[in-house]
Amino acid sequence: MELPRLWRAVLIVDVVESVRLMQAHESAFIRCWRRFVDDVRQLLLPAGGGRLVKSLGDGLLLEFNDAPVAAQAAFWLHERMSLVARSMPADACPRLRAGLHVAEVVVDGLDIYGPGVNVAARVAALAAPGETIATVQARDQLLDGVDAHSEDLGALFVKHLDSALHCFRLHPVTAVPHGTAGAATARPDIRTPSHDTQLPRMAVMPLHVRGLHGDELSAGHLVADNLSLRLARNPLVRVIARGSANALASRGLTASELAARLDVRYLVTGSLTRLRDARWRLTVELVESPGDTVMWSRTDTLDPDLLLEPDDDYTAEVAMALMAAVASLQVERTGTHSLPSLQSYSLHLAGLQLMHRTAVSDFERARPVLETLVERHPLQAMPRTWLSQWWVLRTTRLLSLTPREDAAQALSHTRVALQAAPDNALALATQGFVECHLLRDLAAAETTLERALACGPNEALAWLYRSVVHGFRGEGAQAWRHAETALSLSPLDPQRHYFDALCGAAAIIAGEYPRGIALAERALMANRHHPPTLRALALGQVESGDVVAGRQTIQRLLALEPGFTIRDYLGNAPAGGEAARERFARALATAGAPLG
């Protein structure tokens, strides 16, 4: 019977100057070695999953499934020998050297065979006392900074091998080379600090799979990839690249360890389980670190074909729910913690969440939250931009008694933001919206929004506000085209009802009644107290022939704005869109709005 050939990480360790130690301290050395080998069998191998192939009296041959586990075993062996040898005389303490190689070997129940074993032995002979030397084949399986720190030794020639070996000296992640070879000191933190403290950082880990086979085993990665892509489209979170998350997935780290390695506050984890009816049960959890606290979770049973489709609706729904959970958590903290004690990203998310809630009390709470963020980062563009948007919304929601003063407040913040970051597309988009919606200067707004899109072609709000400018002018086709772009760029936006409201109006102005009415109705489901959406909906209903529904919508509008008249509406509209205003006025009159 042919013996199996398997890829293995081969680790060889031996005692430096073992002949001298045996001659001078035979009994003590034997006791030390036997205790060391017992510890290897009882402590190391059950935890690490390796196999002790043979003990030679002054060396060990071990095999492991992969290099990361073998490297950790090598570090453990060095430390364990130092601990076991503490009772020996100073000149008799055994020190190990180790060699690590990954190769295809022949395996039986007693031994392993092949050139790879010889390579590991030759590499071990290159090591100084206390060192571990690895070949490039082993190094390629290690994640630098997680499994080990590697020091490139270049190409080295060894006995009985025709070609040189590219080798690396391995150091535990708690140490780095310093001074002479093999010496080490505490490793400083060399991670790149995150300067974007206003946004939470999140990593999506591959889902654990249970009961899946063959190609299905990759489903945990595929679902995580789809979810990560969805979340990465959201401007309110920073999502760690999937390559970094995948590299740590098989390391057996706790959630806190993963979060620390990836420098994130939140982890998205979960599992996929095959059920008896061939459907899958998907569980997704949001874990906050430190503390490894599960802040949100959901479990669903679904058809795997639907789950693995590109841009599937289910993954979009889960991503939106995750972002809502993160934002709600920050809002809750603004009510239980003093604002100065909260992290900047907590203030950022809470401010945005509160700003777009329908309750007036929540909306008013957003202002001090955002002002605290501005005080903390007075020269950064983003806090100023969001505070400017709050002043805009205060007017559009009819909460302001002094719209001109509110417009001045909004512009003052966008101007500071643009002084700090002249090419900030979001700040430019917000200024354009102020010029359009509050100052009623469509020409200035269009110029500013064109500049915003030149600086940031993918800024969804710039496209959205540009659609509003075209809508005021009655340019329905352009308004709807820009609105569709805004929707495509921000499909998971936490302000979706805001996008739905403005895009619904654009679609209705363009004569795309079914789509426009659907968007307007969805916006009103999330925020039923939004007069502009009710006006746009009434227009769409009347022009599409459903006058009865239009009249009902106007009654809802009058319940919110008892003093609303068509005359006031026409008086507040910006110059440059007379035909559009007359069109709105006719529809509103047909629906029963008072002329004034």
Image (cartoon, rainbow, N blue to C red):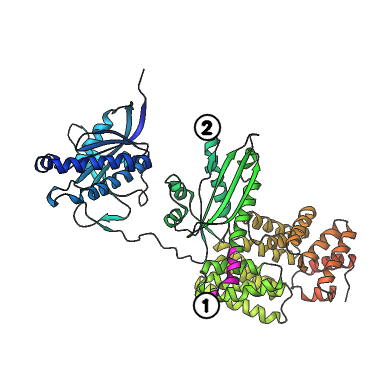
Question: Residue 593: x, y in percent?
Answer: 87, 70
Q: Amino acid at mark 2?
A: Gly
Q: Mostly what secondary structure, the magenta segment?
A: helix
Q: Is residue 84 left or right of residue 523?
A: left
User: Which span of residues is magenta-colored?
Assistant: 329-340
Magenta stretch: includes residue 333: yes
How many numbered markers are drawn? 2
Pick the residue in front: 31 or 253.
31
Label 1's element?
helix
| Three-letter code, disc 1 | Glu
Residue 566 place in picture, x, y as percent:
84, 73
Q: Which residue is mark 2?
A: 214
Quadrant housing residue 359: bottom right
Residue, x 36% and y 43% (percent of image)?
A: 68
In contact (CB < 8 Å): disc 2 and disc 1: no
Q: Is residue 373 left or right of residue 26?
A: right
In the image, 439 versus 20, the foreground residue is 20
Q: Quadrant of the N terminus?
A: top left
What crowding class fits label 2: few (fewer than 14 Cα within 10 Å), some (14-19), or many (20 or more)?
Answer: few
Could you tell me which residue is drawn at 61 percent across and 63 percent down? 328
Asked whether 459 or 78 is in front, the reply is 78
Residue 92 visible (yes or no): yes
At x 27% / y 42%, what residue is drawn?
Answer: 134
Distance Cα–Cα, label 2 vs label 1: 55 Å
Q: Residue furthest top?
A: 1
Q: Earlier in the sequence, mark 2 or mark 1?
A: 2
Q: Nearer the viewer, residue 28 or 257?
A: 28
Left of 54 or right of it: where is 217?
A: right
Picture quarter containing residue 184?
Answer: bottom left
Check disc 1 and report the residue beneath it: 375
Q: Is residue 146 above or below residue 29?
A: below
Q: Is residue 389 above or below residue 121?
A: below
